[in-house]
Amino acid sequence: MMSNSAANKSGNSFKEGLREDRRQIGLWCALSSNLVAEVLNPIGFDWILFDVEHAPNDIPLLLSQLQAMRGSATEPIARPEWNDAVAIKRLLDIGFRSFLVPMVQNAEEARVAVAATRYPPEGIRGVATLNRAASFGGDPNYLKTSNSNVCVIVQIETSDSMDKLESICGVDGVDGIFVGPSDLAASLGHLGDPSAPVVQDAIQNIVTTAKRLGKPAGTLAPARDDALRYLNWGFSFVAVGSDIGLLRQNAVTLLSDFQGQPETGA
């Protein structure tokens, strides 16, 4: 007979990593490019976030990026534009199984996000078997295994969601919480300054509370010192950079290395 731990085990290694509180390092992708995804695929990040909320992504672009990630050990995570069942369903159907849902304010909104990712009776996801996620009808077990493989992370980005954190963490099917530093800073009156002491205190309080409740916490920290500090505070999954940031900063550095150099004759 299968043990309870084996029966509950997911085929999603990122989700399993959350359950085991393993450190998982990620990268943010907003360039909406399948070539960028293909370059990043073999590098070895534990997860890569493909953004829809703040990036010019649509379903065909996301599909091409998923195709570029095929066979990768890196888990692709989608952030939909909103906590919307139809938007999440379309992402599920093209093959995403891990989600970062933005602006979740309370437990009811967290339950809505979870329900959108599950087939009945656990949720409200519409049933289709000829989609990419089900290998276009070639995976007879997809309907049976999809619910257990889905991973749902909800974003804590406002003072309201901070106040409701314990009830949000208590929602069945929420696998983790994720602090959005920029929106949280704006909500706390420090627009554009997530390094403000009151914001940093709030971030530390969030991860402390989440860990006390047994819920893994993640965040985005493109600055190395911030990422190391957050990991030390107990964040277990952190995006340590972005495709846009890597491209821009390296381009700026490259140009500065050559600007102002004396010209030499041929």
Image (cartoon, grey):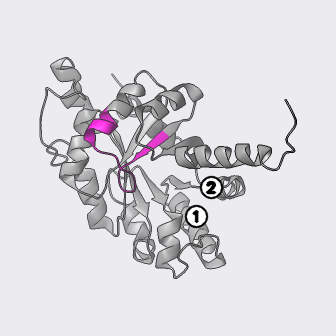
Residue 242 is situated, as x and y percent measured from the top left of the image, at 55, 47
* 224 sits left or right of 152 in the view: right
Q: How crowded is mark 2: few (under 14 residues within 10 Å), some or many (20 or more)?
A: some
The residue at 50%/55% (across/down) is 214
Label whose residue precedes the other's in the sequence (2 or 1): 1
Can residue 22 be seen at all in this image of the molecule?
Answer: no
Residue 169 is situated, as x and y percent measured from the top left of the image, at 41, 61
As drawn, 32 above or below 172? above
Can residue 103 be seen at all in this image of the molecule?
Answer: yes
Residue corresponding to mark 1: 208
Quadrant position of the C terminus in the picture = top right
* 41 sits left or right of 3 in the view: right
Q: Are marks 2 and 1 in contact (CB under 8 Å)?
A: yes
**In the structure shown, which secondary structural element does the residue marked by tag 2 occupy?**
loop
Residue 185 is situated, as x and y percent measured from the top left of the image, at 53, 73
What type is the residue that disc 1 sits on?
A: Thr
The residue at 53%/31% (across/down) is 40
- Which stretch appears magenta? 48-63
Check if residue 59 falls in the magenta segment.
yes
**In the structure shown, which secondary structural element does the residue marked by tag 1 occupy?**
helix
- Nearer-the-camera pick, 255 or 208: 255
Residue corresponding to mark 2: 234
Quadrant of residue 97 in the image? Answer: top left
- Nearer-the-camera pick, 84 or 246: 246
As drawn, 139 above or below 39? above
